Amino acid sequence: MDENRITGSAQNLGGKAKDAVGGALGDTKLQAEGKADKAEGTVRNAVGGAKDTAREWGEDAQSELTRLRGQVETLLRERVSPALSDAADTAGDYAQRAKDVAVRQGEYAAGVVKENPLVTVGLVAAVAFLLGRLTGHSRTHHFQPPWR
């Protein structure tokens, strides 16, 4: 409980007493002081209540944040990490399969080349010729060295 609430309640109670005594004795000054003390006590009590409420809200918010942080950590540990691990394992499996296929295809291609070396040389020459035609300049131009 906030100190202002305690002080305000005591001041309010004292103000009521002064007001009552002043009214009983016909002392308007004492009665006015009692009313002023009562009003000030009410304000202090309200300020203390607001501080208590703010403190409680802050504590509630902090505990809620702590609870949410725990839930996020649990989700990461129980769901996200295993899912990432499974995805990494799957990607590793696919990479190994791709490597195996590439090795097998390379071995097959090497076998074809060994069995048919002349056909292979002919195919390579044809591909080289086509690439040269596609990327080469026209033969009608004469080569001119750049230093001329």
Image (tube, grey):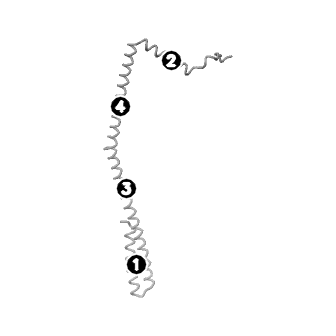
Q: Along the polypeptide, which appears first: circle 4 or circle 3?
A: 3
- Residue that badge 1 annotates: 15
Disc 4/disc 2 C-alpha distance (Å): 34 Å
Could you tell me the amino acid type at mark 4?
Tyr
Q: Nearer the viewer, mark 4 or mark 3?
A: 4
- Residue most toward the left? 78
Disc nearer the start of the sequence (2/1): 1
- Earlier along the polypeptide chain: callout 4 or callout 2? 4
Question: Is disc 2 surrounded by few (<14), some (14 to 19) or many (20+) residues within 10 Å?
Answer: few
Nearer to the camera, 8 or 58: 58
Judging by the rendered image, the residue that carries numbered circle 4 is 94
SS type, badge 3: helix
- Please state the horizontal and vertical placement of residue 123, each as a whole percent of the image: 46, 16
Pinpoint residue 72: horizontal percent, then vertical percent. 35, 48
- The residue where tag 2 is placed is 128
Task: Say if 140 sits above or below 1 in the image.
Answer: above
**In percent of the image, x 35 and y 66: which residue is there?**
1
**Residue at x-position 33% and y-position 50%:** 71
Q: CA distance from mark 1 to mark 4?
A: 84 Å
Q: Which amino acid, by three-letter code, is at mark 2?
A: Ala
Mark in the foreground, 1 or 4: 4
Residue 103 occupies which quadrant of the picture?
top left
